[in-house]
Image (spheres, helix red, strand yellow):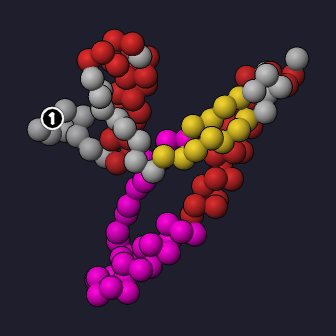
């Protein structure tokens, strides 16, 4: 069934996330513009990043549904019992943070660049 082909599903996921970001972008730019009008120095060299968590559902027909977007996703182990129950979630978060820090150019090791 081509409806459940992983490549098709990923394209649908990318479309949903892209559409959500297109809706969010004007509000994010407006927030930056508000800062520039509040007596802040020029923001030309300023770089800011937002980590968003997209909660998606893929139904039996292969339709991708956006459930919510979390502007401040939890990236910590809330308790040892949760970590024991959901080990994959914490492995994914660790890899996500590693990738995020790489994009931002943060050091590979605590205390300096390798």
Compare residues 50 and 80 and report the one nearer the observer: 80
The quadrant of the image that shows the C terminus is: top left
State left or right for residue 70 relative to residue 68: left
Say which residue appears at 35% left-offset and 27% top-offset. 94
Q: Name the outermost residue toward the top.
A: 84
Query: Does 89 sit above or below residue 110?
Result: above
Compare residues 87 and 13 and report the one nearer the observer: 87
Say which residue appears at 71% left-offset and 29% top-offset. 58
Query: Does 24 sit above or below residue 67?
Result: below
Query: Does 42 sit above or below residue 72?
Result: below
Query: Does 12 sit above or below residue 25?
Result: above
Q: At numbered mark 1, what does the secondary structure look like: helix, strand or loop?
A: loop
Q: Residues within 10 Å of mark 1 (few under 14, many from 20)?
A: few
State left or right for residue 108 relative to residue 12: left
State left or right for residue 80 relative to residue 31: left
Q: Name the outermost residue toward the left.
A: 111
Say which residue appears at 30% left-offset and 27% top-offset. 77
Q: Let me know if residue 32 is in the magenta part.
A: yes
Residue 73, image quadrant: top left
| Residue 41 position in % (x across, y down) | 28, 83
The span shown in magenta is 26-54
Kindly identify which residue carries mark 1: 110
| Residue 64 position in % (x across, y down) | 73, 35
Label tally: 1
The quadrant of the image that shows the N terminus is: top right
Residue 76, image quadrant: top left
């Amino acid at each position: 069934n081509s409806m459940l082909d992983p490549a098709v599903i990923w394209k649908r996921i990318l479309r949903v996330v892209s559409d959500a970001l297109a809706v969010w972008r004007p509000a994010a730019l407006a927030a930056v513009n508000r800062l520039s009008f509040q007596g802040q120095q020029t923001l030309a060299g300023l770089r800011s990043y937002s980590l968003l968590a997209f909660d998606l559902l893929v139904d039996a027909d292969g339709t991708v549904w956006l459930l919510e977007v979390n502007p401040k996703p939890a990236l910590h182990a809330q308790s040892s019992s949760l970590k024991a129950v959901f080990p994959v979630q914490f492995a994914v978060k660790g890899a996500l943070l590693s990738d995020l820090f790489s994009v931002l150019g943060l050091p590979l090791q605590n205390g300096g660049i390798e």
